[in-house]
Amino acid sequence: MAGTAATSSTVVGSFIRRFHADILTAWKAAARTTPELQALPAPALVDNMPALLWQLGELADLAEQHGISPALSEMSRRHAVARLEEGFAVSMVVEELSLLRESVLAIWWREHAAIGGDELRVLNLAIDRAVAASVTAYMETREPTLAKLESLLAASPVGIAFLDAELRYVRINEALAELNGRPARDHVGRSVRDVLPADVIDRLEPLLRRVLEAGEPLTNMALTLPDGRALLANYFPVRSPAGEVTGVGGVVLDVTDERRAQEALRVEQARLQSILEHAPAAIWVKDTEGNVVLANRRLADALGARFEDLIGRRSEELLPSDVAAQHRAHDQLVVRERRPIEVEEVVPSANGDRTFLSIKFPIPSEPPLVGGIATEITERKRMEDELRAAVRTREDVLAIVSHDLRTPLATIQLSASTLQAQGQPDPRVRRHLDMIHRASRRMETLIDDLLDTVSIRGGRLGLTMNRELAESVMAEAIELARPLAAENGLDLHQHANLSGVEVMCDRTRLLQVFGNLIGNAIKFCRPGDTITVTGERAADAVRFSVADTGPGIPAHMVEHLFGAYWSGAGHTKRGSGLGLYICQGIVQGHGGRIWVEDTAGEGARFSFTLPIAA
């Protein structure tokens, strides 16, 4: 008996190996009649079946022995895993092997006309072992996947559930069960109508049935629970391997905090927009591509656009190309150097160009944003231009008049000097000639002051710089002023500690500064007062001072002393008001500074500095 079984095993094994190709062809033809397998391309359909069939022949030779060969086990596992990845159930794997059994028998009957009981038993035993190996491999692969799925459901903070075709809970994780207010175990087997509040299910149930019927997902559905919590739900059809909709899957997210944050953000944005709308300047924020992401209506007015058309637009879409390019360059400078800038920007309009003073600044973000605040200065610019034009006109007139006055003034001075030289015997004539001579000298001084003022205002004051001994210049200035001081009953003193100290200066202009300062002191001092001129070294500069013991300067006048054309309103000894202004221009032209120190009633002290020559 044992010898007969062994012979049958050998016959079956040899038969499978001999007709391997024919059996495989018959199996493919039978498999194509199965709806689930029809959709598979040929390579996926065949898969590991040729190797698995070959190993069946090897197993048939050993059919009387227990166990299964490692090669057949590996082929069965591969085939089962492949079908699992394609979405097939284990029943389809069993059906495929049943079709294989039928294909072997069909070829056997074709070749042998009949099959004995021993051969049929050996064949069935070999295929049954292959089925068992495939099912075992399939389940060994599937069960860890299911275990992972269950772990994922349990650990997920997002609510997840699966419903059958009757909308009964099949699976639900704790996150969704908590949202529903019941333990997960109280959901399984119960319908959604038994679990969810009436006002929620009345809206939700028709939508879930539509998912079942149409097989289309329902996404981003907003739900609100009776306690005010906000949910965002997505529902999708669950299909069998054959493509039939067998249930509904759901993913539900609690977005209450997000909704509250969005509402708070909306309130803050409304507040911000209110502030922007009431701001007196145009305000905006742009991204790195130049698109406007935030703006107020004053920006729309400045650009001549509708407010509704601003967001998402670029300067190139709102302004002429050359103007837009300039604005864009300023934005890029802010992004590149990550610092604020202040620039004047022009925007064309139907009534002419409008000028804005724009402050642009980086806003930290990734990528960075550019903020801007623009105040219109069109009217101010117009007034400034008119003022500059008026000043230029005035200075041009002063320069022309002063220059043209020199010729007749020279004639007057020459005539007066000629007549004085003739020694007129009449005292009255001599007195008038002296008056003419003094008036012409004062007029010459005034013309010089006017020309100096125009030069200083225009930044054209000429200076001829040379090395000079500081003490020598100061001594010359004092000697020039000493006769006038004596004539007015004043004591003129000097104190200097400048031996060998040199300054780079225009000697004539420096004497002009001394002359103005000492001349002012002589003008305002009373007989018996003292004027003291001092010079001393102060670090890398020389400081000169002219101090007097006169009546001093009222406090409210001090801040105006160095202004042009100002000589103290109401003062009894007024001049052109240009002397101190010219002194300041000359000193600053030398790189020094000038100031006054005063104690009303106790005299005044004017000081200025000059850099020491290198």
Image (spheres, rainbow, N blue to C red):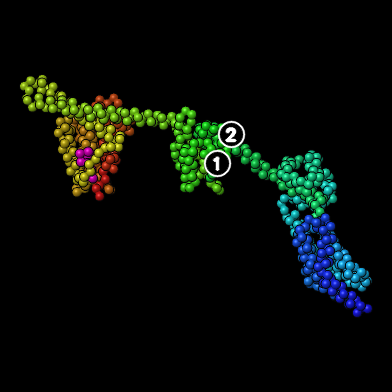
In the image, 243 versus 194, the foreground residue is 243
Q: Is residue 329 above or below residue 490?
A: below
Residue stretch in magenta: 504-510
Q: Quadrant of residue 530?
A: top left
Instruction: Give the numbered dot on residue 448.
Output: none
Q: Which residue is mark 1?
A: 291
User: Crowding at label 1, few (<14), some or many (≥20) Cα neighbours within 10 Å?
Assistant: some
Query: Dot 2: what SS?
Result: helix
Instruction: Give the numbered dot on residue 308.
Output: 2
In the image, 612 versus 288, the foreground residue is 288
Q: Is residue 518 visible?
A: no
Q: Residue at x 25, y 29 (%)?
A: 400
Q: Is residue 564 visible?
A: yes
Q: Residue at x 13, y 27 (%)?
A: 414
Q: State how far apart marks 1 and 2 are (Cα).
A: 14 Å
Q: Say whether residue 358 is magenta.
A: no
Query: Dot 1: what SS?
Result: loop
Q: Position of residue 92 (x, y in %)?
A: 83, 59
Q: Position of residue 381 (x, y in %)?
A: 41, 31
In the image, 24 versus 325, the foreground residue is 24
User: Which amino acid lies under the numbered mark 1 shown in the image of this protein?
Assistant: Asn
Q: Are marks 1 and 2 in contact (CB under 8 Å)?
A: no
Q: Is residue 115 above or below residue 519?
A: below
Q: Residue at x 56, y 36 (%)?
A: 310
User: Crowding at label 2, few (<14), some or many (≥20) Cα neighbours within 10 Å?
Assistant: few
